[in-house]
Amino acid sequence: MTMKILICEPSGAGKLSHYTFSLCDALQALGHEVTLMTGKDYELAGKSPAFQIERVYSRRLPLHYIPIIEHVRRERPGAVHFQGLRKSDYPLVRLLRRFKGLKLVYTPHHVLPHRRRFYHLPIYGWLYRAVDQLIVHSDYDRESILDLFNVDPERIQVIPEGSYELYKHGRVSREEGRKRLGIPPESPVVLFFGYMSRQKGLEDLLRAFRDVRLELPESRLIVAGDPGRDRERYMALIQELGIEDAVIKRFGYIPMEDAEGIFMAADVVALPYRRAIRGPMVQLAYTFGRPVVATNHGVSGLVEEGRSGCTVPPGDTEALARAITGLLQDRERLERMSARCLELSKSRYSWKRIAEETLKLYG
């Protein structure tokens, strides 16, 4: 039976918008009528998807209230699924609760904002309790919500993030990716990708990579993403460690169309997180068949030890260096892991499967 579904994603840019696009596309492919309401400067507007897109969110003012309420009143969707709720959305959720038969679903991609304020706990607690269903991406996030807020456990479902086929065009080979970055064809290559907050552990990786180079002098490290306010800090550390000639820096926001070349150039993706951080990096690495070396913060249930990657304790730079070196030295093992990563991307993390699991919560 066809269902009308409204999905709301405020930012319209970055990985959250890419996740939402993939979910909308998969739900539409299953035969449902999907409308996405998103930011006015929607990053993927040129993709011409089968689902409907309305750009209604501004950066600050709650101008999205009216079009969302009007859409629900006119179209009578079976579900409104939020891929992000702002603290100003408290009244919007209250208004939507007045529509009988409407299922409100919320996927909090972060349990609380990175920069926590005193008012976040009461506001987000109310939002979590006000919707009918919460979707989180890990058992850790589920337990965090249960610990922090008085939410019925039956209303929290764990559905992992999907693969990032949206990034994969098949136009860039390993050789071409390396050529673009100025990396020799046979060099062992490690990749750090994404926003470089200090909790992501880039400093630990840089120190570990110095030891990797002692064993593998031709190895390279790609550092790609936004360093925020720590650009000079990372540059100084790279110089202090004497690895300037081996670190390829691509500082700044990485457009989706550039990600393929960067991932294809790498052999291994490093996730040296210092604390539990939820994000799509494991699935993004799997999309390109790249095994991961990660700390055991934030990857529980995602990394199959010895099959799709390996894990080390957070902050242990020696263990991180050993794990990376061991993988880079064993080409046959890397190829087996790469095949497993691709298999997981197309099965456990396929968007068809994720859309089917999500639909069960709309009914």
Image: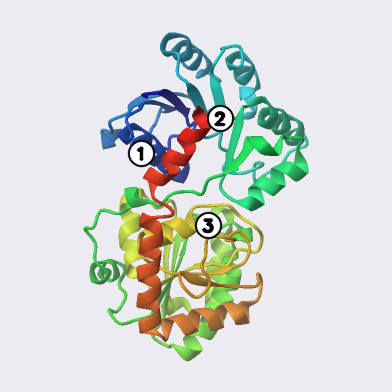
Q: Which x, y percent locates residue 305?
A: 53, 72
- Mark 2 vs mark 1: which is more N-terminal? 1
**Quadrant including the N terminus:** top left
* Residue drawn 32% across the image and 75% down it: 183
- Mark 2 vs mark 3: which is more N-terminal? 2
Residue flagged by tag 3: what amino acid is it?
Answer: Pro
Residue flagged by tag 1: what amino acid is it?
Answer: Ala
Q: Which residue is mark 2?
A: 105
Residue flagged by tag 2: what amino acid is it?
Answer: Val
Q: Is residue 329 above or below residue 144?
A: below
Circle 3 crowding by C-alpha within 10 Å: few under 14, some 14–19, many from 20:
many
Marks 3 and 1, how far apart in space?
33 Å
Q: Which residue is mark 1?
A: 26
Circle 2 crowding by C-alpha within 10 Å: few under 14, some 14–19, many from 20:
many
Q: Is residue 263 visible?
A: yes
Depth order, front residue of 60/212: 212
Colouring convention used in this rendered image of the protein: rainbow
